[in-house]
């Protein structure tokens, strides 16, 4: 049996994920690179969208669409304003983040609240649900 998920492990995962997602949003990496941070199946919900991504190719296509939208807004980086972690059980945690997407001149693109439900999956933490809304 694997060890229980810890807050430190979730924060370390989020730092790696955010670095990969930032690189994707700048057009410096591919959706396939970031897809490794997601499980299959992944649920994505926003105020306007409910998606159930049931294959690796669906996750990759969704991430590619996110990248296209970010590149179109001249995205440069994400400022993490706040995070909290809740350990749900031995394999699952929820990381809630208040984020500000910014351009290179630090002008604001959007503020978001996102909850990432991460699960230890094949030995690694992976997103299995992403719940987002404007902040």
Image (cartoon, rainbow, N blue to C red):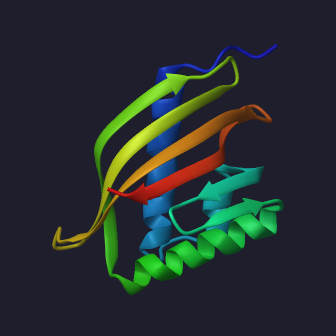
Q: In this view, does 16 lie to the left or right of 61?
A: left
On screen, 91 above or below 21? Answer: above
- Name the image quarter holding residue 120: top right
Q: Is residue 99 left or right of residue 85?
A: left
Q: Can you give x and y, in whole percent of width and height, for residue 46 in the image?
A: 53, 61
Q: Can you give x and y, in whole percent of width and height, for residue 84 in the image?
A: 39, 31
Going by the picture, which residue comes out furthest to the front?
Answer: 47
- The residue sitting at 45% across, 32% down in the picture is 11
- The quarter of the rendered structure image containing the N terminus is top right
On screen, 8 above or below 26? Answer: above
Out of 76 and 100, give the one closest to the viewer: 100
- The residue sitting at 82% across, 59% down in the picture is 54
Q: In this view, does 20 lie to the left or right of 31?
A: left
- The residue sitting at 47% across, 77% down in the picture is 27
- The residue sitting at 58% across, 78% down in the picture is 65
- The quarter of the rendered structure image containing the C terminus is bottom left
Q: Is residue 77 left or right of residue 36?
A: left
Q: Can you give x and y, in whole percent of width and height, for residue 129 in the image?
A: 64, 47
Out of 55 and 129, give the one closest to the viewer: 129
How many numbered discs?
Answer: 0
On screen, 32 above or below 112? Answer: below
Q: Can you give x and y, in whole percent of width and height, for residue 55 in the image?
A: 83, 62
């Amino acid at each position: 049996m694997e060890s229980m998920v810890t807050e430190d492990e979730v924060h370390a995962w989020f730092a790696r994920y955010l670095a990969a997602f930032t690189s994707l949003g700048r057009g410096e990496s591919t959706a396939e690179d970031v897809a490794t941070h997601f499980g299959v199946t992944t649920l994505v919900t926003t105020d306007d969208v409910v998606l159930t991504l049931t294959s690796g190719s669906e996750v990759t296509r969704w991430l590619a669409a996110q990248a296209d939208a970010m590149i179109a807004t001249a995205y440069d980086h994400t400022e993490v304003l706040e995070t909290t972690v809740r350990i749900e059980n031995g394999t699952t945690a929820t990381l809630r983040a208040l984020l500000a997407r910014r351009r290179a001149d630090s002008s604001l693109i959007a503020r978001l609240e996102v909850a990432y439900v991460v699960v230890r999956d094949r030995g690694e933490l992976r997103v299995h649900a992403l719940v987002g809304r404007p902040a």
